[in-house]
Image (cartoon, rainbow, N blue to C red):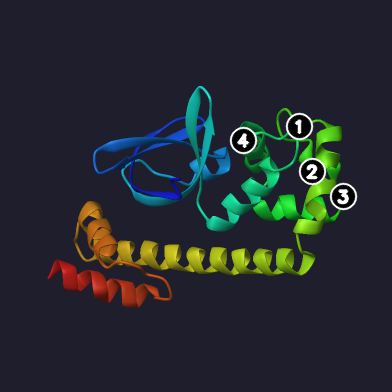
């Protein structure tokens, strides 16, 4: 069982990504919302579910273990296959799906391609006891905090790059130096700038 693939994004398709891991290209099908977060050439770790049937072996991938676990719950519902599960997680985020299930919102789930109202109701019926409301609120809060932290880090990086170009460095040199500093989480623009200057001097 392949539980994750780590490597470079070699190719991005409409429904899949190809990850180059040690010279081997793994085709992994992913929700479109997650594919939109990937960039060609970046290093990434994707959590995978390996689906084996008589005529094919496919990998379905997710950015977090939590997303993969929700996908596994979905395809455990009778009548929901991996492609339908992927379609649901393309139309709804993991948090949105949780709240749709816990609030009996069949209309939200049936917005996914190929999911009718009856299937949506079946998903709610079978998953309601497997999803916890308190957990849903905690996950949503955690994701909001992560998004805010990421936005702060992005702003610090942007301001540091602007400061370096104002000092006479080219935009590409400034970006490279900032990238080489590693994780900028929790750093303000001044701290990122100082760390990047050490790379340039």
Q: What is the C-alpha distance between the residues marked 3 and 1? A: 15 Å
User: What residue would you read off at disc 2?
Assistant: 123
Mark 3 falls on what kind of element?
Answer: loop
Residue 155 image point, x, y percent: 44, 65
Residue 166 image point, x, y percent: 26, 63
Q: Name the residue located 25 percent from the left edge and 74 percent from the top edge.
A: 195
Q: What is the C-alpha distance between the residues marked 2 and 1? A: 10 Å
Q: Is mark 3 in CB contact (under 8 Å) with mark 1?
A: no
Residue 32 image point, x, y percent: 56, 38
Residue lying farthest to the top in this orientation = 55
Q: Is mark 2 in CB contact (under 8 Å) with mark 1?
A: yes
Q: What is the C-alpha distance between the residues marked 1 and 4? A: 13 Å
- Residue 101 relative to residue 135: left or right: right
Q: Nearer the viewer, residue 140 or 161?
A: 140
Residue 82 marker: 4
Nearer the observer, disc 4 or disc 3? 4
Q: Nearer the viewer, residue 73 or 162?
A: 73
Mark 1 falls on what kind of element?
Answer: loop
Which of disc 1 and disc 2 is earlier in sequence? Answer: 1
Q: What is the C-alpha distance between the residues marked 2 and 4? A: 14 Å
């Amino acid at each position: 069982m392949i539980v994750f693939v780590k490597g470079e994004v070699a190719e991005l398709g409409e429904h899949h990504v190809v990850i180059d891991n040690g010279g081997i290209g793994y085709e992994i099908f992913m929700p479109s919302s997650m594919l939109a977060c990937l960039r060609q050439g970046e290093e990434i770790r994707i959590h995978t579910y390996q689906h084996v049937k008589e005529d094919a072996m496919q990998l379905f991938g997710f950015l977090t273990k939590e997303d993969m676990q929700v996908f596994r719950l979905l395809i455990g519902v009778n009548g929901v296959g991996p492609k339908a599960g992927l379609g649901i997680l393309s139309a709804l985020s993991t948090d949105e799906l949780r709240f749709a299930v816990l609030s009996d919102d069949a209309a939200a789930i049936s917005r996914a391609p190929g999911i009718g109202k009856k299937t949506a109701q079946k998903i709610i019926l079978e998953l309601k006891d497997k999803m916890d409301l308190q957990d849903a609120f905690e996950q949503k809060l955690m994701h909001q905090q992560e998004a805010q932290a990421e936005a702060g880090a992005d702003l610090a990086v942007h301001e540091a790059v602007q400061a370096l170009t104002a000092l006479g460095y080219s935009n590409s040199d400034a970006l490279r130096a900032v990238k080489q500093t590693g994780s900028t989480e929790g750093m303000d623009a001044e701290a990122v700038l100082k760390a990047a200057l050490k790379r340039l001097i």
